[in-house]
Image: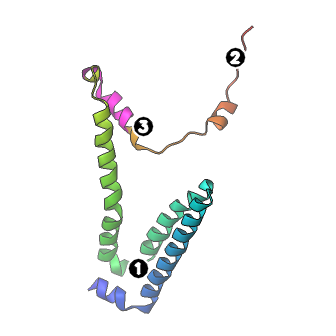
């Protein structure tokens, strides 16, 4: 019933139509950036997620069941990807020293392999003192 009510409200259907057009514009821009080798401009991808979740978060609480369903659908692919990525990382560990690894080591290894954290090495090295040899 909530979904039918949401579909019939002009305000909300217009909001999602507007979201669709914004996403299409961003996708066209992304393709143009790739074609022109503008790799730094591709940081707009995170903006896409913010637009999608922002639209669903803006719904009032009277549509709580529809929101729960949408969050489940929106997050299922990311969680499946993370699981597959973790299993792939575990296959790499197959070696002679595998039995010597502790749970803590395995946990740290998985965290490193499944996150996209990229430290700013230049910024981190600014705070360190260089050692000169004589």
By what rule are the colours in the image chosen?
A: rainbow
On screen, residue 38 above or below 68: above
Kindly identify the residue that appears in the image at 43 percent across and 44 percent down. 115
Horizontally, is 120 left or right of 88 in the view? right
Kindly identify the residue that appears in the image at 37 percent across and 33 percent down. 109
Kindly identify the residue that appears in the image at 31 percent across and 70 percent down. 68
Residue identifier under label 2: 131
Residue identifier under label 3: 112
Q: Earlier in the sequence, mark 1 or mark 2?
A: 1
Camera-side mark, 1 or 2: 2
Q: Residues within 10 Å of mark 3 (few under 14, many from 20)?
A: few
In what element is the residue under mark 3?
Answer: helix
Q: Position of residue 114 (x, y in %)?
A: 39, 43
Please tell me whether the stretch drawn in magenta is mainly helix, strand or loop.
helix
In the rendered structure, are the residues bearing label 2 and label 3 in contact, judged by CB atoms less than 8 Å apart?
Answer: no
Q: Residues within 10 Å of mark 1 (few under 14, many from 20)?
A: few
In what element is the residue under mark 2?
Answer: loop
Q: Position of residue 37 (x, y in %)?
A: 61, 56
Residue identifier under label 1: 60
Q: Residues within 10 Å of mark 2 (few under 14, many from 20)?
A: few
Magenta range is 99-110
Q: Of all residues shown, which one is farthest toward the right?
A: 134
């Amino acid at each position: 019933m909530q979904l039918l009510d949401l579909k019939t409200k002009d305000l909300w259907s217009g909001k999602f139509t507007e979201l669709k057009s914004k996403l299409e514009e961003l996708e066209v821009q992304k393709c143009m950036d790739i074609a022109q080798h503008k790799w730094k401009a591709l940081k707009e991808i995170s903006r896409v997620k913010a637009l999608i979740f922002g639209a669903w978060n803006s719904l009032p609480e009277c549509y709580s069941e529809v929101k729960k369903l949408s969050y489940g659908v929106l997050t299922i692919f990311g969680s499946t990807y993370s699981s597959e990525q973790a299993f792939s990382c575990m296959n790499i560990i197959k070696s002679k020293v595998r039995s010597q690894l502790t749970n803590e080591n395995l946990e740290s290894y998985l965290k490193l392999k499944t996150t996209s954290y990229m430290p700013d090495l230049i910024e981190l090295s600014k705070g360190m003192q260089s050692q000169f040899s004589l």
